[in-house]
C-alpha cells in the first residue's frame, strides 16, 4: 500500500525541526562574536537544545494531552515559530538561549505527538513505514538543511537562518491543518477503550532506545577527528564522507520502516545486531579508507533504520494514542545521545579515540535484550492518568489524548 500524501506535512515539519537543532554548530563563531560571548559559551546553545528536548518535550506533551494530535501539533509549531522569530531578533545571548530551549521543548513534544498522528493516518500494515517517512525529514535536514542553513548564515547574518526556519515551521503548520485521515487507515487515535499499559515493557523499550541509538554517538560525536587521525582521511574530504553517510541515513529510515511493517517482532533486534557488527568492524577496519567508506554507508543504513522501529515499538506497547509515552521515547533518544557523547569524551580525553567504535558496539549490544519481545505477560499497568489495575480487573485506557474530533 502506498503511503498517503497527508504524511508529507509531518515530514516537512520534521525537516524544519531537524535543521534548527544543528544549524547553530556551523554558526557558533559568528554568534559568539555578535553576542560578545566566547565560542565555548556559545556552545551551550547546542547542549541546551538537547536538555530542552529531554526535559521540556514530555512536559509540553503532558500539558497538551487532552488535545487531539493535529491540534496539539499546530499549537507546538505556533510556539516553535514564535521562538524562532525571537531568536532572529534577539538582542542578547541570554534571550537567544531561552528562546532556543523553548524551541527544543516543542521539538521533543512534536516528534512524540507526530508519531501518534502518523500511525493514525495509515492502516496497521504501514505504521513503521509512516514513521520512517516522518523521521526521514529529520535525516534529510542533517544532509541538506544544516549545511544550507550554515551557508545562508555565513553569507548573510546568523539571524537569517532562524527567520527562514520560522517560515518553514509556519508553512508546515498551515499544511498540517489540511491533513485528513486516509479512508483505509485504522482509527489509531480513537475514543479510549479498555487497555492496560505494560510499564515494564515500556521501560525496556526506553532503555533499548537510549542504548541502541545513543551508543553510536560515542564515536559519531568525534567522527571528524577519527577519520583524520585513525583513518588517515584528508580533513577536506571529511564533508564528502559525511554527505555519503547522511544519504545512507535517509535511506536507512525508509528501509527500517519497511522492515518494521514486514517483520514487526524481528526487525528491531536484527537491526541492532547488524549495527553492533558494523560498529565493531568499523573499529577493526576504520584505519583503512576504503573499508571506512563502506562501513560508514552500512552504519548510516543500520543506525538510522532504528528510529522508526524504536518509536513503533513504544506505540505498540503504550497504545496508538499514548502521546506522552511517544514523547518520552523521543527524550530517551536524546538521553542516549548525551550518554554516548560522554563516553566518547572520556575515551578521547584519555587518548583512546580508536576505542570509541568498540564502546559504541558494546552499548548497542547491551540494548539487544531490551529490544526482544517478552513472551510472558507481566502484570499490566494502567496509563499515566489512572491508578494501578490488578491483573484480571478491567484496565484503564492508555490513551492520554481525547477522542479525535470529527474533522480530524
Image (cartoon, rainbow, N blue to C red):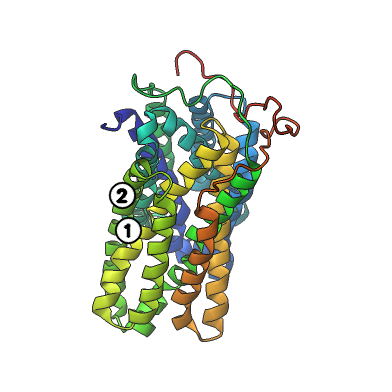
Residue 206 percent across, percent down from the top left: 57, 51
Marks 1,2: beta carbons within 8 A:
yes
Taking the spot 47% from the left edge, 53% from the top edge, the residue there is 21
Q: Nearer the viewer, residue 18 or 65?
A: 65
Does dot 2 land on a helix, a strand or a loop? Answer: helix
Taking the spot 62% from the left edge, 54% from the top edge, the residue there is 94
Which residue in the rendered view is the most extreme toward the bottom? 351
Binning the other alpha carbons within 10 Å of mark 1 as few (below 14), some (14 to 19) or many (20 upward) gives many
Q: Quick one: quadrant of the N terminus?
A: top left
Q: Is residue 206 above or below residue 199?
A: below
Left of 104 or right of it: where is 300?
left
Residue 391 percent across, percent down from the top left: 70, 33
Marker disc for residue 173: none
Image-quadrant location for residue 25: bottom left
Residue 228 percent across, percent down from the top left: 35, 81
Does dot 1 land on a helix, a strand or a loop? Answer: helix
Taking the spot 65% from the left edge, 32% from the top edge, the residue there is 63
Q: Nearer the viewer, residue 157 or 297?
A: 297
Taking the spot 39% from the left edge, 78% from the top edge, the residue there is 283
**C-alpha separation, residue under disc 1 versus residue under disc 2:** 8 Å
Binning the other alpha carbons within 10 Å of mark 2 as few (below 14), some (14 to 19) or many (20 upward) gives many
The residue singled out by tag 1 in the image is: 301
Q: Is residue 152 above or below residue 319?
A: below
Left of 240 or right of it: where is 88?
right
| Residue 45 in sight here | no
Marker disc for residue 255: 2
Which residue in the rendered view is the most extreme toward the left? 290
Residue 126 percent across, percent down from the top left: 35, 35
Image-quadrant location for residue 286: bottom left
Amino acid at each position: 500500500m502506498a503511503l498517503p500524501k497527508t504524511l508529507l506535512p509531518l515530514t516537512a515539519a520534521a525537516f524544519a525541526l531537524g535543521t534548527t537543532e544543528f544549524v547553530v554548530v556551523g554558526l557558533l563563531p559568528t554568534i559568539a562574536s555578535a553576542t560578545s560571548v566566547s565560542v565555548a559559551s556559545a556552545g551551550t546553545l547546542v547542549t541546551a537544545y538537547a536538555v530542552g528536548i529531554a526535559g521540556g518535550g514530555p512536559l509540553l506533551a503532558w500539558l497538551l494531552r487532552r488535545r487531539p494530535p493535529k491540534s496539539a501539533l499546530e499549537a507546538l509549531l505556533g510556539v516553535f515559530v514564535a521562538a524562532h522569530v525571537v531568536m532572529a531578533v534577539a538582542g542578547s545571548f541570554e534571550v537567544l538561549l531561552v528562546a532556543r530551549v523553548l524551541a527544543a521543548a516543542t521539538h521533543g513534544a512534536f516528534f512524540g505527538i507526530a508519531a501518534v498522528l502518523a500511525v493514525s493516518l495509515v492502516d496497521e500494515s504501514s505504521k513503521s513505514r509512516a514513521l520512517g517517512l516522518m523521521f526521514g525529514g529529520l535525516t534529510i535536514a542533517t544532509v541538506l538543511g544544516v549545511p544550507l542553513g550554515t551557508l545562508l548564515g555565513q553569507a548573510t547574518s546568523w539571524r537569517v537562518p532562524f527567520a527562514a526556519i520560522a517560515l518553514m515551521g509556519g508553512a508546515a503548520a498551515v499544511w498540517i491543518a489540511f491533513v485528513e485521515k486516509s479512508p483505509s487507515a485504522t482509527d489509531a487515535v480513537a475514543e479510549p477503550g479498555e487497555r492496560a499499559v505494560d510499564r515494564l515493557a515500556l521501560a525496556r523499550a526506553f532503555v533499548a532506545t537510549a542504548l541502541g541509538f545513543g551508543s553510536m554517538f560515542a564515536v559519531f560525536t568525534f567522527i571528524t577527528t577519527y577519520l583524520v587521525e585513525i583513518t588517515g582521511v584528508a580533513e577536506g574530504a571529511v564533508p564528502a564522507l559525511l554527505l555519503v553517510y547522511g544519504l545512507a541515513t535517509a535511506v536507512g529510515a525508509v528501509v527500517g520502516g519497511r522492515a518494521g511493517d514486514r517483520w514487526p517482532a524481528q526487525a528491531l533486534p536484527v537491526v541492532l545486531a547488524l549495527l553492533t557488527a558494523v560498529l565493531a568492524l568499523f573499529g577493526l577496519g576504520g584505519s583503512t579508507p576504503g573499508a571506512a567508506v563502506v562501513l560508514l554507508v552500512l552504519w548510516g543504513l543500520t543506525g538510522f533504520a532504528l528510529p522508526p522501529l524504536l518509536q513503533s515499538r513504544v506505540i505498540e506497547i503504550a497504545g496508538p494514542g499514548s502521546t506522552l509515552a511517544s514523547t518520552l521515547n523521543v527524550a530517551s533518544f536524546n538521553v542516549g545521545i548525551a550518554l554516548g557523547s560522554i563516553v566518547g569524551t572520556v575515551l578521547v580525553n584519555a587518548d583512546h579515540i580508536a576505542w570509541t567504535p568498540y564502546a559504541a558496539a558494546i552499548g548497542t549490544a547491551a540494548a539487544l535484550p531490551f529490544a526482544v519481545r517478552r513472551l510472558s505477560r507481566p502484570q499490566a499497568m494502567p496509563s499515566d492518568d489512572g491508578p494501578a489495575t490488578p491483573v484480571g480487573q478491567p484496565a484503564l485506557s492508555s490513551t492520554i489524548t481525547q477522542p479525535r474530533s470529527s474533522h480530524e
